[in-house]
Amino acid sequence: MKKKIIGLILWSSLAAGILAGCGNKDNVGEGSSFADGSSMSGSGAAVGSSAADNTAGGNNNPSGNGKVYYLSFKPEVDPIWQNLAAQYTQETGVEVKVVTAANGTYEQTLMSEIANTDAPTLFQINGPIGYLNWQEYCADLSGTNLYSWLLDKSLAVTGENGGVYGIPYVVEGYGIIYNNAIMEKYFALEGAQAVSMDEINNFASLKAVVEDMQARKDELGIQGVFASTSLNPGDDWRWQTHLANLPVYYEFQEKGISDTNNLEFTYSDYYKNIFDLYLNNSCTAPGLLGSRSVDDSMAEFALGQAAMVQNGNWAWSQISDVPGNTVQESDVKFLPIYTGVPGEEGQGLCTGTENFFAINSQASAEDQAASIAFIEWVFSSETGKNAVTNELGFIAPFNTFAEDEKPADPLAKEVIRYMEDPAKTSVAWIFTTFPSQRFKDDFGAALLEYAAGSRSWDDVKNTVIERWAAEKNAVEAQ
């Protein structure tokens, strides 16, 4: 199967269209953040504005006399970008100015700056919806090296004419994290339902292994196969957002749509498959899950009390930093979230991003060329790649990074491994189309009642359908 992400990565339009990272609890949930820790909140003026001196020296800008103005959006990494700009200027003689908008002001700052004579030549959009807002300022990047270097070109933002107008520069992924040492111990047991992880490639095989492991948990020295399904309000984002991404993704894919005012939740039974498997084969009885947090869950995994836990690559520190951690780095692996959907043997991790570079099409040809050259230097030179990996902490989606230039933590490595596997199809992040945090909170509350046995699955399904429609249609009516 050709490696790709089916369809566009879909994005919700926030009230002010502000770029928001996964670390924003309203978008995804507590404990979740992009590799760069992106988030937009608060307010204030632009910070970290400086121009690198235009010193004498060589110039790798093909136009020879352009300059770069990069409008960035994360104050915490402004010093890193300032340093990169200075190093590039010293190496090439090309002037690079980096201005970083204060928290929560990126869209407003871009709107103000783009109208100036000295407008940004390099800026960021938050996916297809961001492109719709800024398309008259987005140059076609299909002929750039940066685009050719993408490991998965379907991640790029494209227009109806086939042009490429936004290029992702950092990605994340989530799935089922497992402790390979515990799995190997199980595979060695007589009568094990599989002999290796290679045999677990769909829900049926996962269910058979999990239920057998749960029945033999004492032999394995674990309290449950899965870490606790945290349903404490505020800690339920892994289920009402991340897990819910899968049935919505498959419904959108089947219907050939990118959003809807009336979700039918046709894949709800597949969601129920995996959610029930989590509930019934974990460290904590279903009726007690309302008091469990994500931290509790990650600690159970880190201490070897559970063999599996659903989370993303950002969770490595939540594993490695737990006092008394018993899990070896080499044993931390990812498995896709299988739900029973036909053909899921080729499914990969849920992979996405909200960070896309765009080049100002209204800038001079020389400035456009200079801006492209600068950003390509960042993701291809030894100096740039070192900063990307070791200072910015990105999982960069480009083939310019050798094995020893990629993030060192095991979960980041796993995300890259799945992205590079031509037999796996990544699941796009659809959760950004969810109506609101209130919708997700209502979904989470319904899941808690279902886990406690006080609500039927049909009730949960109806809650999702009704709340989705009510909120989507209310927004449209405004």
Image (cartoon, helix red, strand yellow):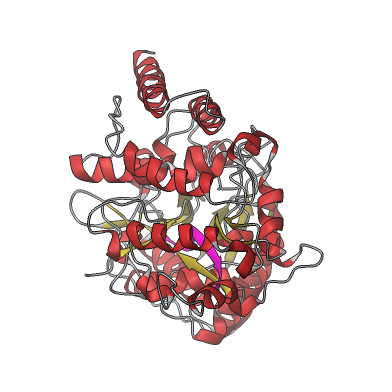
Q: Residue at x 54, y 69 (%)?
A: 412
Residue 22 rendering spot, x and y as whole percentages? 56, 48
In the picture provided, is 222 more to the left or to the right than 404?
Answer: right
The residue shown at (23%, 54%) is 342
Does the segment drawn in magenta span residue 170? yes
What span is colored magenta in the figure?
A: 168-180
**In-front residue for pair 146/407:** 407
Residue sitting at the far front: 190
Residue 311: x and y, percent?
55, 55
Instruction: Give the answer, above or below, for where 314 lies relative to 470.
Output: below
- Where's residue 314, x and y in %? 60, 59
In the rendered image, which quarter is residue 304 located in? bottom right
> Front-most of 214 and 56?
214
Q: Say how many tags the image has.
A: 0
Instruction: Kindly indicate the quadrant of the structure image that contains residue 262.
Output: top left
Residue farthest to the right?
A: 323
Quarter of the image that includes the N terminus: bottom left
User: What secondary structure is the stretch in magenta mostly built from?
Assistant: strand
